[in-house]
Image: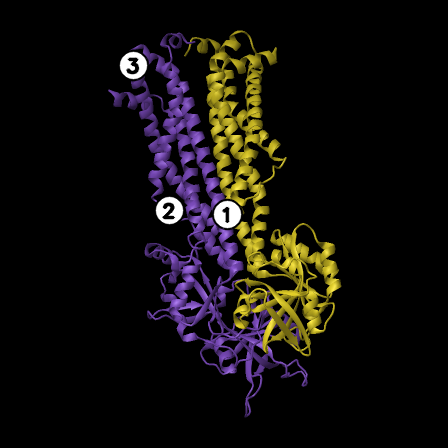
Chain colours: A purple, B yellow
């Protein structure tokens, strides 16, 4: 009987249900899409933040003081200590290896340079200039028999090149924008640049000819220098396989009060939790563990800004999501309320022929619940589509669909639809059937 | 007569109107709060990004063949000319500006980079530095210095320790006021006030570069740099691309995200109000029938009802706006720790939107023009 009453109500007057159903579908679609995006946004933005460059700097532990201005090291080659290139594959074996997006070693070597445009007296000046050895896109062998392609293309994405980058391991170079303007006639690309080690230590040292393949513009000190493949810099400085600095770009979780604590004072459970979270402090510890004798520093300028902005934007989005949920709830509640109000006549007749308040409420609530489940499910599907479009247009990658949200959205729809009709139903229980039937 | 009818209408059906009012007020509150927040968010976020430090650099540039800072005779700029130009163009969007002169001096016979700058601006230029000790609050304090973490470790210096710097035959005796943990090249440098470095290098009144931290969008930073270039045509003014570009891209994405979410909520809220008003209008069928039977023209009747929903929309919009501004203040406080000031344009925007939505909801009333009064009065 009860089921038939509810069923009849749907069949007889579908128009009346349409408004609530539409509100439910739209409301739940918005709730689903905003929740999906809000859940996804942390990861996406953290990835975006990597365009600010590396957030970890690895240097030898027992190093002399680097004489570094504007990112260029002016120390002579025989001073300070070096790190070994061969160890770098180990970075991809740490617990958070997939969070290591890229790393780039740097070896700054003082050298004397000659270009075709220089006069004889300008060539090979006694005061050495610095040439920067690095990787642009280099295949690093990883101990698990795979390779990992990394270099400045990943850690320094703002570097712009005119022409092409040097080939990995070739006797080629790219020159900085300012350097190219000052030391070349016409276009530098295609010309040859000769490099001599700073002080020939006995015997005749042959100049190394390097083909200029491109002009780089970085907006930093590199604009005034020459960039060469790492192994070329190594052979000029006579330090095969060595480098001085390593920039690491890692995806991290914003620091919180837990990550700020000293790992040595944690209980074993806390330590495990800390070690297994991608905090910048736990990643740097893991790097220290695979590369012994290094000092891993957080580039605080980048890491701190990332943490602050990420947590703020996350909070902001949750507030906006909350507003979306409230708006969705209001829309559903308001339409539920009006549909119940519209059906005062029906309630009057039901009560006149002997329905109890409980039965009337039961029928209405059952109807609302069915609407909520159907509308919520449809809304979820629509919302998932909407979230894909939103993710695609904002981040270029569609937001991942989360099935976990389905029960959440259905529950929300049910709660909202029922709450919305409860208030008018309470009023309906006070109805006196007689005036309603009279049409007053 | 019209006004009296309107008043009676509004008073007569308080119960039903309550739902509509609640929908209108909360809709207007959510919309105005989010629009306000969205307008304020760019300003707040660009402020946040200033923790990245300097993003505009003034350097001697290409005029110099030996622009290399380590070359024997580095090319320098006149301190007065550069800093005066910066002071002239300085607006509230320039968070900090300071000149720099780098000298590779010797401390205990080890080369160390000495950066001469305005130490009172350093705290603002590099807000992420962790400092042990105290900042040097005056640019005229020539007796004290800040040292990087690695410098402290290398020379085993603690707070209050003396440090002697030598360059050729000149020297400077300083006291360590603070140890800086910057997480960058600054960890290897000694920071002194500009005149100390100038004396040491024997280059009074000269600087190597100037750094500025400017808030704003990529375009406004570029515009500021352009303005500075006009005053300093002989030097090179350039935004640090690593920072300005990434910052611009991030801001764009965050804004796009928030705007699209706000748009969704806006549509939803408008739909909610629309549905409520439509339901309210349909309930008025009996009233319309009675009025028609009494001889009211349909245009007058519809006008009456439209006036009713119009008043509702305006009132709901106004109350909602006030609530929404308060809400966005709270949001700004909890997200950015700074309250977002209300923009006056929110009020006409939200109220107008609410009136339009309410009127659109009442449009089905026009259909009632075709209804025969007798049918309605019979209760069919």
Asked if marks 1 and 3 fall on the same chain, the answer is: yes
Q: Name the residue rendered at 35%, 31% in the picture.
A: A414
Residue A114's place in the image compared with A352, above or below, is below
Residue A64 visible: yes
Report which residue position mark 3 lands on.
Answer: A355
Q: Nearer the viewer, mark 3 or mark 2?
A: 3
Q: Nearer the viewer, residue A170 or A407?
A: A407
Q: Position of residue A122 (x, y in %)?
A: 67, 82
Report which residue position mark 1 lands on.
Answer: A312
Dot 2: within a 10 Å radius of its alpha carbon, few (fewer than 14), some, or many (20 or more) residues?
some
Residue B173: name its quadrant.
bottom right
Q: Nearer the viewer, mark 1 or mark 2?
A: 1
Image label count: 3
Taking the view exactly as shown, the residue that stands out farthest to the left is: A1
SS under mark 2? loop
Report which residue position mark 2 lands on.
Answer: A401
Asked if marks 1 and 2 fall on the same chain, the answer is: yes
Q: Nearer the viewer, residue A231 or B336?
A: B336
Q: Position of residue B27 (x, y in %)?
A: 51, 30
Marks 1 & 2, CB-CB < 8 Å contact: no
In which chain is the residue bearing label 1? A
SS under mark 1? helix
Residue B281 visible: no
Q: Earlier in the sequence, mark 1 or mark 2?
A: 1
Q: Position of residue B22 (x, y in %)?
A: 49, 25
Asked if marks 3 and 2 fall on the same chain, the answer is: yes
Q: Name the residue rendered at 58%, 29% in the picture.
A: B351
Query: Relative to A285, is B281 on the left or the right?
Result: right
Q: Position of residue B217 (x, y in %)?
A: 61, 51
Q: Earlier in the sequence, mark 1 or mark 3?
A: 1
Query: Relative to B185, is A335 on the left or the right?
Result: left
Dot 1: within a 10 Å radius of its alpha carbon, few (fewer than 14), some, or many (20 or more) residues?
some
């Amino acid at each position: 009987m009860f089921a038939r009453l509810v069923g009849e109500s749907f069949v007889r007057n579908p128009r009346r249900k349409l408004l609530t159903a539409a509100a439910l579908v739209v409301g739940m679609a918005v709730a689903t899409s905003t929740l999906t995006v809000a859940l996804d946004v942390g990861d996406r933005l953290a990835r975006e933040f990597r365009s600010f460059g590396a957030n970890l700097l690895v240097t030898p532990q027992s190093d002399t003081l680097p004489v570094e201005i504007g990112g260029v090291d002016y120390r002579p080659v025989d001073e300070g200590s070096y790190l070994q290139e061969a160890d770098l594959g180990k970075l991809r074996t740490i617990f958070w290896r997939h969070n290591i997006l890229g790393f780039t070693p740097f070896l700054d070597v003082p050298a004397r340079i000659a270009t075709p445009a220089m006069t004889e007296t300008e060539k090979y000046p006694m005061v050495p200039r610095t040439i920067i050895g690095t990787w642009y896109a280099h295949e690093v062998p990883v101990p698990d028999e795979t390779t990992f392609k990394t270099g400045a293309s990943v850690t320094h994405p703002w570097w712009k090149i005119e022409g092409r980058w040097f080939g990995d391991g070739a006797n080629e170079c790219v020159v900085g924008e300012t350097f190219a303007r000052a030391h070349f006639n016409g276009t530098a690309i295609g010309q040859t640049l000769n490099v001599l080690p700073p002080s020939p230590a006995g015997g005749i040292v042959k100049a190394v000819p390097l083909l200029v393949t491109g002009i780089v513009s970085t907006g930093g000190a590199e604009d005034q220098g020459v960039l060469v493949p790492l192994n070329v810099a190594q052979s000029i400085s006579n330090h095969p396989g060595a480098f001085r600095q390593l920039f690491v770009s890692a995806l991290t979780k914003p620091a919180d009060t837990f990550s700020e604590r000293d790992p040595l004072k944690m209980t074993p459970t806390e330590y495990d939790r800390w070690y297994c979270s991608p905090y910048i402090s736990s990643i740097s510890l893991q790097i220290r563990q695979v590369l012994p004798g290094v000092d891993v520093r957080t580039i605080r300028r980048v890491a701190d800004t990332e943490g602050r902005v990420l947590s703020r934007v996350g909070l902001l989005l949750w507030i906006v999501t909350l507003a979306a949920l409230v708006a969705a709830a209001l829309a559903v509640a308001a339409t539920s309320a009006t549909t119940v109000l519209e059906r005062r006549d029906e309630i009057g007749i039901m009560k006149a022929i002997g329905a109890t308040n409980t039965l009337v409420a039961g029928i209405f609530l059952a109807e609302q619940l069915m609407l909520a489940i159907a509308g919520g499910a449809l809304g979820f599907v629509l919302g998932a589509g909407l979230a894909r479009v939103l993710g695609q247009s904002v981040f270029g990658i569609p937001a991942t669909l989360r099935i976990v949200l389905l029960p959440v959205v259905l529950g929300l729809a049910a709660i909202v639809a029922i709450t919305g009709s409860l208030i008018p139903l309470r009023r309906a229980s006070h109805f006196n059937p007689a005036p309603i039937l009279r049409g007053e | 007569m019209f006004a009296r009818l309107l008043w009676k209408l509004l008073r007569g059906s308080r119960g039903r109107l309550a739902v509509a009012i609640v929908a209108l007020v909360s809709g207007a509150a959510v919309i105005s709060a989010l629009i306000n927040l969205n307008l304020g968010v760019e300003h707040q976020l660009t402020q946040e990004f200033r923790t990245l430090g300097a993003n505009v650099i003034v350097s001697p540039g290409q005029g110099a063949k030996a622009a290399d800072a380590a070359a024997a005779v580095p090319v320098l700029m006149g301190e007065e000319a550069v800093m005066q130009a910066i002071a002239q163009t300085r607006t509230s969007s320039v968070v900090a500006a300071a000149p720099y002169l780098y000298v590779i001096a010797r401390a205990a016979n080890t080369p160390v980079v000495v950066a001469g700058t305005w130490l009172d601006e350093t705290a603002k230029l590099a807000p992420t530095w962790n400092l042990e000790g105290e900042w040097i609050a005056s640019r005229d304090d020539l007796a004290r210095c800040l040292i990087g973490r690695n410098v402290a470790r290398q020379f085993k210096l603690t707070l209050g320790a003396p440090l002697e710097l030598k360059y050729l035959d000149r020297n400077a005796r300083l006291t360590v006021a603070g140890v800086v943990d910057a997480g960058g090249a600054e960890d290897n440098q000694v920071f002194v006030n500009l005149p100390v470095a100038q004396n040491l290098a024997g280059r009074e009144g000269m600087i190597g570069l100037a750094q500025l931290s400017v808030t704003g969008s990529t375009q406004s930073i570029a515009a500021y740099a352009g303005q500075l270039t006009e005053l300093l045509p002989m030097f090179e003014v350039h935004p640090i691309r690593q920072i300005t570009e990434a910052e611009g891209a991030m801001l764009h994405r965050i804004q796009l995200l928030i705007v699209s979410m706000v748009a969704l909520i806006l549509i939803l809220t408008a739909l909610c109000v629309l549905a409520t008003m439509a339901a309210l209008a349909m309930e008025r069928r009996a009233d319309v029938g009675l009025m028609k039977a009494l001889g009211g023209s349909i245009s007058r009747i519809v006008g009456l009802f439209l006036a009713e929903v119009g008043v509702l929309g305006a009132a709901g919009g106004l109350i909602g706006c006030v609530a929404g501004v308060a809400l966005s203040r709270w949001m700004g406080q909890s997200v950015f720790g700074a309250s977002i000031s209300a923009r006056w344009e929110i009020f006409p925007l939200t109220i107008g939107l609410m009136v339009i939505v309410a009127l659109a909801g009442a449009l089905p009333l026009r259909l009632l023009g075709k209804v025969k009064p007798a049918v309605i009065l019979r209760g069919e």
